[in-house]
Image (cartoon, rainbow, N blue to C red):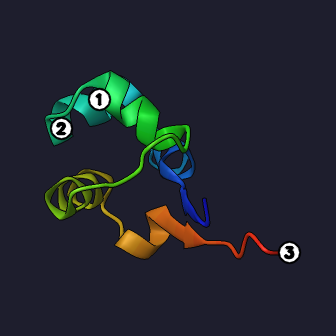
Amino acid sequence: MAIIINIDVMLAKRKMSVTELSKEVGITMANISILKNGKAKAIRLSTLDAICRALECQPGDILEYRNDSR
């Protein structure tokens, strides 16, 4: 997939664990792991909003586009 989700990078920068993020965002650790490992097919804007609020970042800090054709 051409969209990369860099939650792990932001978690490291904020020195926050997946458990802490899960509690702040209100989604399961399993769902955060799915996002973190690139297995997600979609993300709700409300979830992205909650993640950005918890990590004090912008959506562009989490989402990255890479062209797969290279």
- Residue shown at the point (26%, 59%) measured from the top left: 48
Instruction: From the viewer's side, name the closer residue of 6 and 24.
Output: 6
Q: Are marks 1 and 2 in contact (CB under 8 Å)?
A: yes
Quarter of the image for residue 53 reads bottom left
Amino acid type, residue under disc 2 in the picture? Glu
Q: Are marks 2 and 3 in contact (CB under 8 Å)?
A: no
Q: Which residue is mark 2?
A: 24
Question: Which comes before the other along the chain, label 2 or label 3?
Answer: 2
With respect to residue 59, does 12 lie above or below? above
Percent coordinates x, y for residue 56 in the rendering: 30, 61
Amino acid type, residue under disc 1 in the picture? Glu
Relative placement, left or right, of 7 versus 66 is left
Label of residue 46 in the image: none
With respect to residue 58, does 18 lie above or below? above
Q: Which residue is mark 3?
A: 70
Instruction: State the CA–CA distance, disc 3 to disc 1.
Output: 37 Å
Percent coordinates x, y for residue 9 in the rendering: 57, 50
- Residue shown at the point (18%, 38%) measured from the top left: 24
Q: Is residue 16 visible?
A: no
Q: Which residue is mark 1?
A: 20
Amino acid type, residue under disc 3 in the picture? Arg
From the image, state whether disc 2 or disc 3 is nearer to you.
3
Task: Estimate how packed mark 1 is, as few (under 14), some (14 to 19) or many (20 or more) residues with alpha carbons within 10 Å.
Answer: few
Instruction: State the CA–CA distance, disc 2 to disc 3.
Output: 37 Å
Quarter of the image for residue 66 reads bottom right
Task: Estimate how packed mark 3 is, as few (under 14), some (14 to 19) or many (20 or more) residues with alpha carbons within 10 Å.
Answer: few
With respect to residue 48, does 40 lie above or below? above
| Quarter that holds the C terminus | bottom right
Question: Which comes before the other along the chain, label 3 or label 1?
Answer: 1
